[in-house]
Amino acid sequence: MNAQQAQWWRTPEINEPAWTWKDASESTRHGKWWQNAVIYELSPWSFQSTSGRGPGGDLPGVIQRLDYIASLGVDAIWLTPIYPSPMNDLAYDVVDMSGVAPEFGTLDDFKRLLGICHNMNLKVVLDAVWSHTSDQHPWFKESCQSRDNPKSDWYVWADPADDGGPPNNWRSAFTGESGWKYCESRNQYFFFNFLESQPDLNWHCQAVRDTVLDYARYWLDLGIDGLRLDAVNFYAHDPSFEDNPTRDEADAMPEGIPPDNPMVEQCFVNSFCREETLEYLAPLRELADQYPDTMLLGEVTLCEDSVVTAADYASGPERLHLAYHSALLADRPMTAGFMRTTLQRVTDAFGEGGTCWIVGNHDYGRLRSRWGGDRRAYPEPFYHMMAGLLLVLPGAFCLWQGDELGLPEARIPEEISPEQLRDPFGKALYPDVVGRDGSRTPMPWVGDDPHGGFTTEGNEPWLPVPQRHLARAVDKQHADPDSLLNRWRRMLHWRRLQPALTAGHSNVLDTPSNVFGLVRRHRSQQLLCLFNLSDHDQEVDLSRFGELRHIHRLDYAWTLADNDHQLLLGPWSAFFANIRLKQSA
């Protein structure tokens, strides 16, 4: 490219949004690593096992596979909990918020992992489980002893109802049954939003909030780059213990909850999703901001409108930097119309920053099983197209381990028998609900190994590795330039070089009904992104975009005609081009 050609590449278009590059670099909504980051979520328990530590994976195993993670081109890793735990719920039942469970290794292993990640330019985000603890936690054991001990109000306690039963109608988000458990030593009930073995902390107690801050400071002092706040919208409850109102036909159905879960019969206004939680976030944000380049990412799901609620949690300097939501977790076909509506809805709620997208994780299944994938049998090109689409959406994106391989969820009981289930949610409700084990199976590294290379010979993994996963193992896809793994690598590495994708605006386009289109804008780049969400060719008139520089090396199926103004976009395909920036006056 000569100097004259380079000029139009860098000059802002006349109708570019008003904010300047100086504004962007100084804003909390632009120019920060997390704002448009791709965060790779991994569970050490399911990632890679090393010898001598039992059936699950560990931190040395993660270290062993860091070269693989770096090869993807992601910006950060998010580790699910590594704390000491009875391991009833993938370590989300914590007994020590500052320790490392021996099953995972040692604190020195974690420090070594952190240092290597930073040398590889990978950020590290640690799960923070602060809405509840294990019932084996010393705090809860003390709290149970009496109504006047030092920890007596650290959990959510209430007197029985007049008939001796639970204090109100609040339900567990996991089972849909009552969320109250009676404790004889106090003649009171304690509340749990999830499992009976996970009593809720009382966030109205100042001592609890102060202690949580201490633990956050501990990990930030160690040098982590962020905290993912588990179930953050569950922190506070109505201290007067009013019933949740019954949902009627006029009330919208909540997102991310199966419609047959009895929990959906109630509106979530008293047991969680309380305004008080937003106030309690301010000291956490103030603490995080004392550590340059660190962030707080909140999980905001299981609520009336997760997009609007998540936007509330990430609005302003006294709340979280990012929050993810359930916008793409709908059990419905993936269509261009759905994507246009969804992106506009998220943009309207969040404005220019704060959003984080998920399509699969340890709780919500796999990308390949999303949008009815197992039932609708989307072809392989669909998932190649979706890799491109998901990576150009404005905001951060969390990629769950194995989704880059296109792993389907393990079938229960065909691939995981009822006797092998480990998820307490699945075990309690099987066969009506199969639970979350289907998306938590070990990573398949080696296709010719019966356990996928996850563990050493002679050791049985904590969950079986489905035979179908072995055909999609890392070693097999690594050797195939056209594999889905290499598609994700290609798109992720390309994405990191695009200013419009790492710190830009977006505009949804008016396109043919089966085509989803948007323009990502930055002062130095305008990127046109078009996606065919159908199984037949789509024509798109490109003349309105002016002069384009087509991006060929991403290897999607498209052709141009009529002096390059008429695009023929193949089934389940994508098209990318840079729009020539206009000369300034």
Image (spheres, helix red, strand yellow):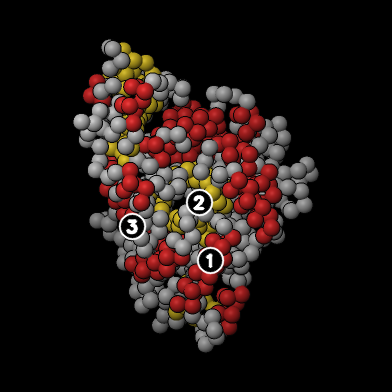
Q: Is residue 582 left or right of residue 109?
A: left
Please rate how many residues cluster around mark 3, counting C-alpha atoms within 10 Å: few if below 14, some from 14 to 19, many from 20. Answer: many
Q: Is residue 10 left or right of residue 129?
A: left
| Identity of the residue drawn at 40% across and 23% down | 551
* Circle on res. 358: none
Q: Is any atom of residue 215 visible in this view?
A: yes
State the residue position of label 2.
Answer: 363
Q: Residue furthest bottom?
A: 148
* Mark 1, residue position: 217
Q: Disc 1 versus disc 2: distance between alpha carbons?
A: 27 Å
Q: Please tell me which residue lies in front, 462 or 403.
A: 403
Dot 1 or dot 2: first in sequence order is 1
Quadrant where the C terminus sits is: top left
Q: Establish if 102 lies above or below 367.
A: below
Q: Looking at this view, is 94 or 106 the one in front?
A: 106
**Depth check: 122 or 250 in front?**
122
**Disc 2 residue type (three-letter):** Asp
Q: Residue at x 71, y 36 (%)?
A: 450
Residue type indicated by callout 1: Arg
**Residue 155 appears in the picture as rendered:** no
Question: Is there CB contact under 8 Å for labels 2 and 3?
Answer: no
Q: Are marks 1 and 2 in contact (CB under 8 Å)?
A: no
As helix, strand or loop, the secondary structure at mark 1 comes to helix
- Residue 71 lies in quadrant: top right
Q: In this orientation, which residue lies closer to the viewer: 232 or 375?
A: 232
Q: Eyeballing the image, is 291 above or below 7?
A: below
User: Could you say where residue 391 lies in the image, as x and y percent from the top left?
Assistant: 43, 37
**Residue for point 49% across, 74% down:** 210
